[in-house]
Image (tube, rainbow, N blue to C red):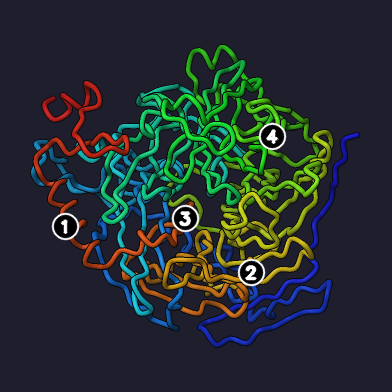
Amino acid sequence: MVQSVIGVCTVLVVVLNITNGFQAPVRSAAQGERVRAQSVAQSSVEENVQTAGGLVDMEAYAAGYFTAMSEVPCKVCSSAEGALPSDLVGSYFRSGPAMFSAGSLPPPRTSIIQPKQPPPPDGQDEDRMVTHPFEGDGAVLALTFNDARSVTARFRFVRTNAFTNERKKGKRLYSGMDYTRSSDKGQPNDFPVPLYKHHLMPGLNKKRKNTSNTRSVYWSKKLLTLWEGGLPYKLDSLALSTEGRSQLGGVLKEKDPFGAKAAYDANTDRMLFYSNRQDASSSVLTLYEFNSKFRLVSDGYGMVSDNEGGKVEVKMPGLALISDFAVTDNYAIFVQPPVATNGMQFLMSKDPAKSCVLESKSALLHLVNRVSSKNNPGQTKTITIPYDNISDADLQFCNAYETNDSNTIIFDVIRSDASNIKSTSTSYPWSTTLSDYASTASKKSLWRYTIVNGNTVSKECLSNDQLVFGVINPAYSGKQHTYIYATVGALQEKVAPPQGITKINTQDKTSQVWLPKQYEFCGEPMYAPKTNADGTTASTSEDDGYILSILFNGKTKLSSLLVFNAQDITTGPIAKVDLGVGIPHGYHGCFTSNPESNWSYEEIERRAKLSDKMEGRGNMWNEVKSDFSGLGLRLDDIEEVLGDIF
């Protein structure tokens, strides 16, 4: 019998701190209580809703969606408050959309074609504005911790083909998702990340714009940026210059719809990716498994040199809207939401809103045997997840693991309940009032799914606070974990934008919460281990490390790096580093403590200057081929060849 736990989730203990600095006292509560500072005043203004710390300044939040008109090649940033820990060593990368008015970064002066007019401010020219933040061109922020006093910051756009085309023309050229963004209410256009992430037209085309804005992955000394449905882009890790679309050394074909998630297996030190070829009646998912040298692996721990091993293909029923997954010792876990497909519309337009309808019924859970599985590699078991009136679509996986007897699989996810969504917003800046935000963003909470004997699935809510961007200590990826870190809204379980940082104990359901000022908003938390001088990990327990997050100040329009003690989130940041520039709200990133990633400022500066010099050399700066073997200029298609002429 399939079991399901249905009901409202209640967190037993929350320790919360709302500070205006770094010296606020710690408050605690008895079991079953929530501690929230008392309201300081009542406000009837809809834009500013009363919370424990004062107000949620929605105009300040909306200000975080702005086009970055300039980049940061290389900059030293010193700690403004507190002190950076001496054992925080390595580099942090984060991806996110940063251009909402298309074509706003002028091309190099040496380009034959130049925009006829300077870029207008966001919102002034509606024809240039994207219709959802997710459509914005991607940029990467990189922070390298050189010593206990400063970090070296870089911020650059990913030079995708689409970005380069619009940059040269100074206008928006890709509008394939406009109909979907304007017509489909509910989870398909959710905030901050929608369920419908790309047009369904396969291959390279003007309908499917690869913004490469979703996730940064640093693996085997290589930096990739990912986007659901297109090839990854490879970047120089020091300068963040774009080296081009990557086919992972020939593993991928040029038209492969690569996924936007990388799942790390801490037990075997491997990284897994997927691609998903969608059709109206069936989809083909390919699971790729790479070792620490970025080579595909075969069974066991063997390596293959012909790139034919190390991957499994799985056929899924219907059009599979998949954008996340997790791994255990033996399995990769995917959840396929129920989607009804209009075959004629799929054939004619392939517009998601016309072709698909997300249904209110049970989703499918696929357990895909990995290439290293003790069972038959590639074999898949599909289980029906019981429907409890909340969608299982677009789950954000935090982690998964098998119990010691391997008869039970547990995975924790942030789950979206879109029943509150009443409208869709396509006009910049999308949401300037809390009611607008609450009518376009789903209720998100932390849930645990338990699979017993590969047959039954049960669900349990671990935290009903408004959560997004859940992460763990990567050293526990694929293993049993206790703690999950996430961004949290300021209104407890009510829908509100991500603002503070929370640490959730999955064993006893207690939480620690820290909230900034009402006009400040945190991005995805990222765990960073303590590191010895020789590069080895100094952490002695799961939470013996640091949490990093980028804070956007909606008043000053500037951003800062916050560093927390991972064991005690409530007391607030132990260090704050002002970046001196504004960084738009972002998505997913990674931290690497590998010794080779601890570059000096001088190394980064030299590479950044070289990158700027190379980009300025003539009009053939549009793309470089990258297959992990070096650099070489390549013109991609006829438009790239003739684009500067006609």
Residue at 45% over, 71% down? 88
The amino acid marked with disc number 3 is: Cys
In the rendered image, the vertical position of residue 182 relative to residue 82, given as above or below: above
Image coordinates for residue 222, horizontal then vertical, percent: 36, 47
The amino acid marked with disc number 1 is: Lys
Image coordinates for residue 11, horizontal then vertical, percent: 78, 64
Q: How far apart are marks 4 and 2 (CA)?
A: 29 Å
Q: Which of marks 4 and 2 is nearer the N terminus?
A: 4
Which residue was labeled with disc 3?
590
Q: Which of marks 4 and 1 is in front?
A: 4
Using the image as rendered, state which of residue 72 and residue 359 is in the foreground.
72
Q: Distance between the residues labelled 4 and 1?
A: 50 Å
Which quarter of the rendering shows the N terminus?
A: top right
Image coordinates for residue 141, horizontal then vertical, percent: 36, 57
Badge 3 crowding class, 10 Å Cα cut-off, few under 14, some 14 to 19, many 20 or more, is many
Element type where label 3 sits in the image: strand
Q: Distance between the residues labelled 3 and 4?
A: 30 Å
Q: How far apart are marks 1 and 3 (CA)?
A: 25 Å
Badge 1 crowding class, 10 Å Cα cut-off, few under 14, some 14 to 19, many 20 or more, is few
Which quarter of the rendering shows the C terminus?
A: top left
In the rendered image, the vertical position of residue 523 relative to residue 224, given as above or below: below
Using the image as rendered, state which of residue 372 and residue 3 is in the foreground.
372
Which residue was labeled with disc 4?
374
Residue at 53% over, 31% down? 298
